[in-house]
Amino acid sequence: MVIDGLPAEFVLGKDDRPPNKALMEAMPYTQSLLANGIAKGYHAKAAPPTVTMPRLKAIVSGAIGGFLDVAFNFNTQALLDDNLLGQFSKVGWKMVMCGDETWLKLFPGHFMRHDGVSSFFVKDTVEVDKNVSRHLSYELSKNDWNLLILHYLGLDHVGHTGGRNSPLMAPKLMEMDEVVKMIHASAIMNPDDKRTLLVVASDHGMTENGNHGGSSYEETDSLLLFIGSKSHATHFSSIISNDVNQVDIAPTLALLFGVPIPKNNIGVMIPGVIDFLKDTHQLRALQLNSWQLLRLLQKQVPGFPCGSFPCDGFSGDQGYNSNDIMEKFCRLYLRSAFLHDSWISTELSRSDNREEKSEIIAAYYEFLINANQWLSHKATDKPSTVIVFGVMSMFLSFLIFSISIYSIIQESYSGEKQLSNGIFTQHLDEGFSLSVIFILVISMGSSSMVEEEQYIWHYLISTLNLLFLRKTMQFFKKESTCFFNLFNGHGKVCISSIFTLLITGRILRGWHQGGVNWAHLPDISKWLEQSGTDLQLIQLIAVILTTILILFSLSLLGRGMKIVLVVGFNFLMSGLLVFYHILRYQHNASLPSSNAATSLAQIIYATLGVSTVGTVLAVPWIMPIQISKACCRDHNHNSAVSYPLKIGSRSQYPELIYSLHIIGWVYIGSWCLLQLLLQQPVNSVVTLLILMQIFASFLFFSQGMLQQKQWVEVAVLYYIGMAGHFALGNSNSLATVDVAGAFIGISNYSALLSGILMFIITYASPTLLLLSMVMYISIKNLETAASPQNVDSGHVLKRILGLPCLVPLTINSILLIAYTIVLILMRNHLFVWSVFSPKYLYACATTVCVLMGVFVVATTVTYAYMVLALRKKY
């Protein structure tokens, strides 16, 4: 019986302290079994990644999978490795499964009866378990099966929707306790069957927020209960320790039921479980486990010194001083085998020879534990040829990006007069923008810095904003003799923009500031959730302000333009739909989604998608050609914020500027509304603040008087996106991935659709800043790109798109190469699975995000330019 997501401390307590009163009262029958010695409980440490599919594979095979299993968790394939179910099938066992359909995907054709349910409808906390329990009475009354697997998902879903302290948690624990009672009572009522064993296990634990996937104690603390009948009660009384590894389940069950241990198992026989067996059988079980690990060592290390026979070349007086690890394993194994053989050959009564037996057990476990630890680390080794080829390929792409950027910068600024003061005086912001990359690369070698990466990004953004403030003050000080002139005209715009960036950045830093190791510390989000603040009201206000800000930005083009009116109306309708969905259906996230809520969410998806795609396709075709320069000048004089029109009036392609301005804000606005629908309610303010940062950045960059390099501005936007990524509560732990939001608007489970929504939620901020590059291009002066001598379309597009696309690609390429090298060097590090591997998954996912964002920007701008060029030509 698998109870998905149940932390062991809910049943067994923590640090030798029992669970709290509410948890004990929620499972009275299970607690009585533990108190009476009928059940024995263990804290079974799960290896990361703590998601269902790799944990089930570890339970039945005893092997540790790779972190790519996180991706396969959403599209499970058949398990081909040697495993318990395969061994049971070979000896003719009949098996039945009810519950998580992951079992059916891992073991197709193994079950004579089955009823699978999807594990990804996290809003369903009731029916998903009722569908399992409805078969229970029937199956317990049957005697045609040898193994019954029940996998309950409801408790995990309760965690995802409401966290550990959800009001639904206690009722769900009571429900699971009733299932345990029903199964155990059925076994007691059949006293003739003395081989019945009930194993209750969980695949992983959960964090305070109910998530999992990382390596924290809360996530890896899974439950393991062995429950026998009354006749076996006395055999569970004496146990050395109740801390084991999850992979230890496979060899333990294999030895208990007399089937071969899976050949790739690295687990160790759980102490105490076989105490009811005779001494000879107990030692035989440990011997078989040792033989299996010895053969696995021989397979991993060709030429392993131990021979096939246990006692080859061993003398009881041999020393143990070698530093060679393989010789250490050999000596440990041979010592335990020598003691065992001596015990077998002795003529003394084995019942009176307890000390010798204990010595043999201790010797076997010393070998087993050391071999287990070494094999666990050995799982990280990969073929060096493939690794070198991958690193060289990434380095080649980095060189191509770097050379392209250098040529564009040389071409763009070849005519500029070079200043003699140097980079650290006149261009300190440029120097720091470059040093940011080296700071990030250096920090990757520290596991603690990887876990708390958000502090680096927030520090870098704050420092860059302060450098911009310094540069602005110096510029206007030279231009004006009066200090107060700073707050007139362009000075006021620049100063207010920078202070907006600083203030919003500080709020974002404090919103989710815990990271991995300090997630328990207070922050703004926790304060709002724990103080009883009406988060729904905050969501509604965020939707209203977001809609107003986007409509205001669109109106800057001119309230009389029909295109702006149509686009603004479509956006307003989308905003109203999101507002209504939050008002009507998101007041209680722990309740299952209704059909009406799902239908409305689907309507919102369709509305946002159709309006966005329609705007991108239609605007270049319907934008008036030869926009009046007088109209542009009027808007420049009448608008307090004239940045797009001012640039457009100086460009040879004002139609392109206007088109990209509209499309850019539609991209930004639609993406923000989508995030307000999908993100956790407490993150709605974060989405609004990131939008304000984009607006303030565009205001500052559009002034153009500070003559900042374009690559610096693009890099800063990329950095803002990454800082926003962590401000939304993300970290380099898989536990912070928001699974619940990935099922909003989905009526039937689809791994593809849920995966896309999960990616959209996780990479909301980086994608938003990449999409904003379309808007950024519209505020830059494209006069040089479109001058008469540069009539070649390829050249024009290169000047327009070069830096906005290549700078993010180059920065990401540097970080990906650096972290790949770090991961290779750290492959034998203690934290390779818990810290470095999940970070590398995030690095790869970030690469996908950057590639997709750059593709959208390049395609959009190219399409708009070619359509407008075609219209001008004909």
Image (spheres, rainbow, N blue to C red):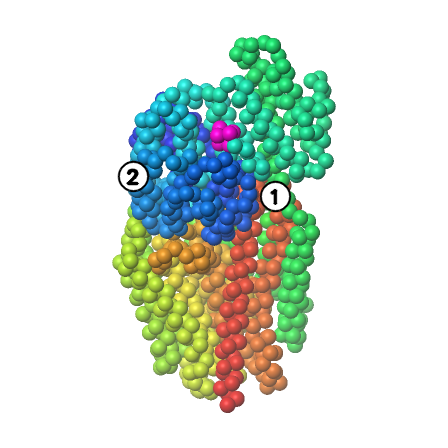
Residue 805 horizontal/vertical position (percent): 56, 68
Which of the marked residues, 1 or 2, is nearer the chain's N terminus? 2
Given residues 858 and 382, the one toward you in this image is 382
Disc 1 on helix, strand or loop? loop
Is residue 446 toward the left or the right of residue 16 in the image? right
Residue 187 vertical placement versus 591 (above, below): above
Given residues 170 and 132, the one toward you in this image is 132
- Numbered circles on residues, count: 2
Residue at 59% across, 71% down: 802
> Is residue 624 shown to the viewer in this render?
yes
Q: Which mark is residue 171?
A: 2
- The residue wearing badge 1 is 380
The image quarter in which residue 346 lies: top right
Q: Is residue 257 magenta-colored?
A: yes
Residue at 50% across, 48% down: 78
Residue 115 horizontal/vertical position (percent): 37, 46
10 Å neighbourhood of mark 2: few (<14), some, or many (≥20)? few
Span shown in magenta: 253-258
Residue at 47% across, 36% down: 92
Give the amino acid type for the residue marked by disc 2 in the picture: Pro
